Amino acid sequence: MRPYRGKRLDNDEWVYGFYVKVLDKEGDDIDLICSPDTSYARIDGEWYLGDSTEVDWKTVSRCTGIKDKKKELTEVYEGDILGENGSVKGNIHEAPELLEEGTNIVIANMGTDEWRDSEQEAIRRGCSYAQ
């Protein structure tokens, strides 16, 4: 399973783990990022998650498995913006103005035609898949 990330609702910081969408008692969606060792249980029809954080659903993105060229250990996520040199410069949630620079590209959502194109361009720029 590839990890996800999302921005916390309470302090706007990034959290990493697996993504879960649940319904509250009123039937409203709650988007959570949970740590990999989170325990969960269903008690009297209610789900209880251990170590989980509510996130803004618009910021949830999946790790692509690609590593950035410059930092070598930096994982590339959907929505990341790559510079011409293959390094992650930011993302569409925090620095959309980076897209105004004509040489930068955004990593598209996986499973789309745009993903295939952005993946190939990232590899062309020197990024690589993790070993």
Image (tube, rainbow, N blue to C red):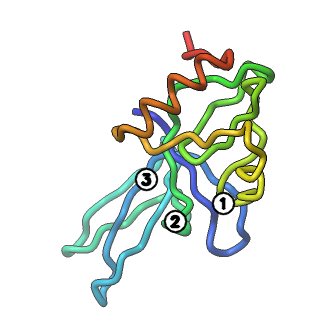
In the rendered image, the quadrant that contains the N terminus is top left
Above or below: residue 128 compared with residue 95: above
- Amino acid at the residue labelled 3: Tyr
Above or below: residue 42 compared with residue 111: below
Badge nearest the viewer, 2 or 3: 2
Q: Are marks 3 and 1 in contact (CB under 8 Å)?
A: no
Q: Name the residue that disc number 3 marks.
A: 19
Task: Please provide percent x and percent y for residue 122.
Answer: 60, 25
Q: Are marks 2 and 1 in contact (CB under 8 Å)?
A: yes
What is the spatial separation of the Cα atoms under label 2 and label 1, in whole angstroms?
Answer: 9 Å
SS of the residue under disc 2: helix
Seen at 30% across and 90% down, the residue is 26
Seen at 65% across and 55% down, the residue is 92
Crowding near the residue tagged with mark 1, few <14, some 14–19, many ≥20 C-alpha atoms within 10 Å: few
Q: Are marks 2 and 3 in contact (CB under 8 Å)?
A: no
What is the spatial separation of the Cα atoms under label 2 and label 3, in whole angstroms?
Answer: 13 Å
In the rendered image, the quadrant that contains the C terminus is top right
Q: Name the residue that disc number 1 marks.
A: 93
- Amino acid at the residue labelled 1: His
The tag on residue 58 is: 2
Q: Is residue 16 left or right of residue 3?
A: right
Q: Quadrant of residue 2?
A: top left
Earlier along the polypeptide chain: callout 3 or callout 1? 3
Q: Nearer the viewer, residue 22 or 129?
A: 129
Earlier along the polypeptide chain: callout 2 or callout 1? 2
Task: Please provide percent x and percent y for residue 110.
Answer: 41, 39
Seen at 58% across and 57% down, the residue is 6
Above or below: residue 62 compared with residue 6: above
Earlier along the polypeptide chain: callout 2 or callout 3? 3
Task: Please provide percent x and percent y for residue 20.
Answer: 38, 58
SS of the residue under disc 1: loop
- Amino acid at the residue labelled 2: Lys
